[in-house]
Amino acid sequence: MGIGINLEDEDERFWFSYARLRDAVVLLHEGYPLPEIFINLDPKALKCDERTNVVIVYPHGNTTVPVALEQNPKLTKERSINLILTAFPEIVEDRETGLKVLHVYDGFTFLSRDDYKSALMASGLSREEAEEKASKIGSKGILALFKFSRPIIAHGIFFHFTHPLRPEIEFVRAPIIQPIVWEAATYLKCKLPDMLKGSGIRTADQFNWYMDQTASMSESEAKTEIRRRLIEFTKAYDTIIIKPEKESGGRNAKVIQIRRNGKIIDENLEEAVNLIYEISKSDSVVVQEFLKSYVRKLYTKEFLENLVERFARLGVPVRLYRDPQTPLFSYFRQILVLGEKGYEISHHITVIGTTGVANVGQGGLLYEYTDDIINPKYREDLRREITKAAYRSMEAQRRYLRTHWKEILDDYLKIHPEFAKRLKFRVITDLTGFDNRDIPYEMGDFMPVFLVDENDNLVRIYDEDTERLIPLYDENGKPTPVEIYDENGKPVPRVDEHGNPVPIKLFDEKGNKIPLFDSKGRQISSLVVYKIEANPGAGLWRPHNDQLPPHRKGEGVYIIFSRLGERAAIYKKKLEEMLGERKVLTEESKGAATYLPSGET
């Protein structure tokens, strides 16, 4: 029986024990060593009663979360946080207080040198033997798997969305990385425009085709209506992207050009109609304008050359400037996490691909988004606009969840019917005062949309109040009535003495931005940033970490878990106040642990 298979059903115990073989093979394949094993380990060896215990409830073979576990030695030293992975914790109710807590029976993590020595001594090794073995351990620690002699209490929880405890985990009232209402909302791409409304941030134009619509019509009727909607929608956008609403990571999304020079491409239209109809048998469909990426314009020449080299190492030839040029697409990811002092961005990511869905899992390359990889002309504008989009969209989504949580859950249960009978949702706050209809963590995807043309002349502006792009020229190239002002408050000429349009330059000959303002006195940006979607989970942690220099490894995940740990520490204090002298709800440990070395120490 695998360590930590804390299940009652015999078949489940067998299956998940068998799956541990797969977990072990995967981790070895990923370059991780075999763990040191401790059976019946006293939690005091890892100061579990003193420290804040943050648990990642994930399978042991997940290849993303070890990047976080590697930060445990640093978290224990600097933050007094134990960060451990456990697969099957248990919700236990205290009879005297009625409090529900999450009991953890085992753990998997990297131990610091001091914690490793402590665990060895708790297993019966002499201080000299333990010190000798621990002296060989570097600052990164050593991978260990341990079964506790008594359960410990989890104070903060990073939870996997498919776990059997998903319907009831919030009743523990500990800080959880993703409450179920927010997790459900991340799948509802059809609702994103509504979520963002009033924030000054927008997403791509879209229309939705719902499962219910297909279910209520004959195939012929549904396809006729889908076709009509596509023809109307593509009067403004030649190319669209079709997405299943509840898939993430670009899975099953497809980019299709419907018009060329304004004329319908019949075979492409029929492909889109059939695709939307087929998807809508099992999921709702989002049909969006396909936002153009200007990779060659946005990034520096040095960055693009590095991009070509990285693609070449993967066997993918990229022509930057020779015809036919390789199409390039990109997006940005900002990860926000809530700490004691508010939200913080832990990860700044950009992904570039050669297909319209520039996903890392589908051939895209991930880079850390730093200012130096962005064309100096747009560097300041992009950083300001993407940060604004991340924080403002977060606040808008938080407001939306408070008033629409019921319909969000109803939609979620359509895709997770296995939770429907067991989900007994009620609005509660955790012991830190955080509402379970709120958002503690988000992986948001964003795209810049240029307001200038290929010559950096201003061709449109963005009105945050109406959340609309306002063109400066009509279809015939004539100036619209929109006024643009210079830094002295004077209107910029729109036509010359002959009535011909005058280009509005946004940069001088040296590439410095020319201060221009709209009628509301707001300085005009070279670009605006759209929100594309929100994502659950831990995606891109590891490839992001791979791009960091050695002295910054783990930087992003350290922020995530130190901030979750701050909230968990508040929970721990509140819990101990409520329990009084009975700070631990479990019996004391007895006897020494059994130590099973990996053979590599």
Image: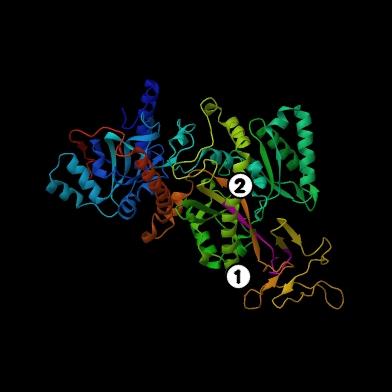
Relative horizontal placement of residue 519, taking residue 361 as reference (left or right): right
Relative horizontal placement of residue 271, taking residue 65 as reference (left or right): right
In this picture the colour scheme is rainbow
Amino acid bearing label 2: Arg
**Residue on which disc 2 sits:** 399
First of labels 2, 1 by sequence position:
1
Q: Residue at x 61, y 40 (%)?
A: 188
Q: Dot 2: what SS?
A: helix
Rendering coords of residue 265 (x, y %): 77, 45
**Residue on which disc 1 sits:** 377
Q: Is residue 503 magenta?
A: no
Rendering coords of residue 224 (x, y %): 79, 34
Rendering coords of residue 591 (x, y %): 18, 33
* Residue contact at pointers 2 and 1, CB within 8 angstroms: no
Q: Dot 1: what SS?
A: helix
Answer few, some or many: residues within 10 Å of disc 2's Cα (few below 14, many 20 plus, some between 14 and 19).
Answer: some
Instruction: Give the residues in magenta.
Output: 445-460
Of tags 2 and 1, the one toward the viewer is: 2
Relative horizontal placement of residue 338, taking residue 87 as reference (left or right): right
Residue 432 in view in this figure? yes
For the residue pair 3 and 168, the one nearer the viewer reads as 168
Q: Is residue 551 above or below residue 505?
A: above
Q: Residue at x 50, y 48 (%)?
A: 441
Q: Is residue 256 above or below residue 586?
A: below
For the residue pair 84 and 542, the one nearer the viewer reads as 84
For the residue pair 269 and 184, the one nearer the viewer reads as 184
Amino acid bearing label 1: Lys
Q: Is residue 563 above or below residue 494?
A: above
